[in-house]
Amino acid sequence: MHGFINLNKPLGLSSAQAVERVKKILRSSLRAEGEAIQPGLPRRSAPRNDIKIGHAGTLDPLASGVLVLALGEATKLVNYAQDAQKAYEFTATWGEARDTDDAEGAVVATSDKRPAQAEIEAILPQFTGEIMQAPPAFSAIKMGGKRAYAMARAGEAPEMQARPVRVDRLQVTGDRGQKDSHATSFFIECGKGTYIRSLARDMGQQLGVYGYVSMLRRVGVGKFGISDAISLDKLEEMVHKGDLGFLKPPQWVLDDILAFTLNEAEAGMLKRGQAIEKHPALASDQIVACVLGGTLIAVGRTDARFLKPERVFNL
């Protein structure tokens, strides 16, 4: 199996646990297929069902929504999904700071003040565009070879350095930003590496009320939207029926990249890792999706004379 799955991750599962659930579902299908080919094959003698699978962007257990999974040869393209614009719906609860910046953490500070709608709207421009943001202490970022969350759980209080991130759109949704309200709902479109937990924390600090994320749902990763994301139950049902309609082809994430049609000789050279002569229509230093008969052969980059393969696919 090669391609992408747009999984609607439920609350309560980590991204790694979601990946393992999907592996289990797919392995059961492959095992059944192998036994159908060789009836009566003992379970431990069935063909080995190694499934290469990864995800494009972690979702915390308390977050739900779009989790893009890459299978087989599509794992070579996972960075294209990771770099895509993300969209989230989230709720910030005011009046408390928590050590994890979400509902899972312990309360570390409180405030009786609640922000008015006008106050919230007024600070949004400060959190839009290119901004500096310090990741949460409880995050998977490595510091000195250790995960920040492991250090935080051990009481080491890691110093999280602010770094630039991009917020393209941030707006209040609904009417939960009134003066006596304790929570406000938002919609955000942002770039890679933006932490919504940090955003809620920083907005709360700017408002002088403290804040944390009490609900987080990812509704988009590039072309992958929540409207066509598949649940684990639906995935299992489709796999059981032999329906692989949920699987997007590897080139699904390459729509923004120029596609270049190869001939048989050129395809053979790229598959062997060899460069080919650059077509005059191609610019220098250009990323190109190289295809033969609709099948992705390689992703390459041009220089002044040649098109050189950077990723080669066995599809």
Image: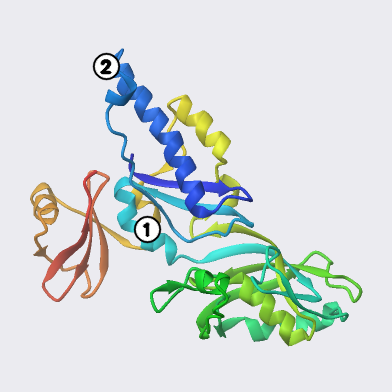
Quadrant containing the N terminus in the rendered view: top left
Instruction: Tell which of 299 and 201 is nearer to you.
Output: 201
Tell me, what colour scheme is on the image?
Answer: rainbow
In the image, residue 237 lies at what x, y percent? 53, 29
Instruction: Tell which of 89 and 147 is nearer to you.
Output: 147
For the point 40% across and 79% down, the residue is: 144
The quarter of the picture where residue 253 lies is bottom left
For the point 62% across and 81% down, the residue is: 128
Looking at the image, can residue 279 be seen? no
> Farthest front residue?
154
Question: Tag 1, which secondary structure?
Answer: helix
Relative to 73, 17 lies left or right = right
In the image, residue 308 lies at what x, y percent? 15, 65
Which residue is under mark 1?
78
Instruction: Tell which of 153 and 297 is nearer to you.
Output: 153
Q: Looking at the image, is 312 positioned above or below residue 275?
A: above
In the image, residue 175 lies at what x, y percent? 84, 66
Relative to 10, 239 lies left or right = left
Which residue is under mark 2?
38
Circle 2: residue type: Gln
For the point 60% across and 57% down, the residue is: 219
